[in-house]
Image: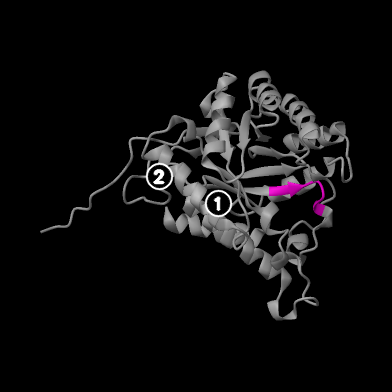
Amino acid sequence: MAFTPKTAPFRGKINAVTLGTGDKAIVIGGQNVMPFYTFDAPIEHAPKIGVEISDLAKEWDAPALNEFYAGCATMADYAKKAETMPGADFLCLHFESADPNGANRSVADCVADAKAVAEAVTMPIVIMGCKNIEKDGELFSKISEALQGRNILVMSARSEDYKTVGASVALAYGQKVGAETADDINLAKQLNIMLKGLSINPENIVMNIGTAAVGYGYEYVASTLDRVRLAALEQADADLQMPIIAPVSTDTWSVKESSATEEDEPAWGCREERAIEMEVSTAAANLTGGADAVIMRHPAAVAAIKKFIEELI
């Protein structure tokens, strides 16, 4: 007797969210099975990989990473080079230098960089700020206005500023908005409800429910991913059916395993290889937990995760 497997697709479904325009547009989400459960139902939209481009990228000191970006001087240069990275699906512009407690770069300068990148590339664009609520609010609004028509995703709307960010990003300028919370299913759901309460279409919302480098409290991330995805699919909870994006690179490149020099930790081996391994491990954990997109930095890490996705889909 032939074996007929019992499939288990759910009645709930993750929203399909389109980023970008034209031939390079991508769709994240859209599935109604657990991550990589292709034996239950086809996964139409494979998880996507974004490449982080920081306005402080000149300070990166990983040899192979700098070799890849050799000759790049401006953010637009970095973006054009990142667009050629095998495995890349979208670009993430990270405006770290806008932080008032850091370089305090002006919003006008950041907007000029964003416009230059948008003119130089065709891939979808995601925007990350500097984590300062007031500065990010102004930055997100101005970039959303400058990049009207590019269908970008702006991260992040938080409970403290969701009204201003949601209204300017999604309602005024028609961009996608990222809902950022910290490893708590109830906070994630509440923020989605509040954004929907502003009359933002759920298909214009992407969640960043929090991540961490593996080994750094990642069990909280894993449990939150599981609970959110099961609630969205098994319980058909419409307030948790937004796709999930995980900004992996910002967490993994800052931990000791990635930043400690070989002189300080000779037994740990090559510093760059450690950082790549930390980035790959964390991205893989997020994707198998339910993330629909990850943001990464190193070409070798991106290539490894692209192969990981292709072999599981």
Report the residue that reaches farthest toward the bottom.
267
Determine the image quadrant of residue 128: top right
Q: Secondary structure at mark 1?
A: helix
Q: Is residue 162 in sight in this rendering?
A: yes
Is 218 displayed left or right of 165 in the figure?
Answer: left
Is 257 displayed left or right of 308 in the figure?
Answer: right
Q: Which mark is residue 182?
A: none
Report, in whole angstroms, how far the alpha carbon at label 2 lies from the one at label 1.
23 Å
**Count of picture labels:** 2
Residue 277 lies, with reference to residue 42, above or below; the image says below
Q: Which residues are magenta?
A: 52-57
Is 280 displayed left or right of 225 in the figure?
Answer: right
Residue at the disc numbered 2:
43
Q: Secondary structure at mark 2?
A: loop
- Disc 2 marks a residue whose amino acid type is Ile
Q: Position of residue 56 (x, y in %)?
A: 82, 50
Q: Is residue 48 magenta?
A: no
Report the mark closest to the observer, 2 or 1. Answer: 1
- The local crowd at label 2, few if under 14, some if 14 to 19, many if 20 or more residues have their Cα within 10 Å, is some
Residue at the disc numbered 1:
221
- The local crowd at label 1, few if under 14, some if 14 to 19, many if 20 or more residues have their Cα within 10 Å, is many
Q: Position of residue 206 (x, y in %)?
A: 57, 35
Q: Residue at x 67, y 21 (%)?
A: 167
Report the residue that reaches farthest toward the left.
1
Task: From the viewer's side, name the closer residue of 57 and 26.
Answer: 57
Mark nearer the N terminus (2 vs 1): 2
Q: Position of residue 137 (x, y in %)?
A: 76, 30
Residue 155 lies, with reference to residue 40, above or below; the image says above
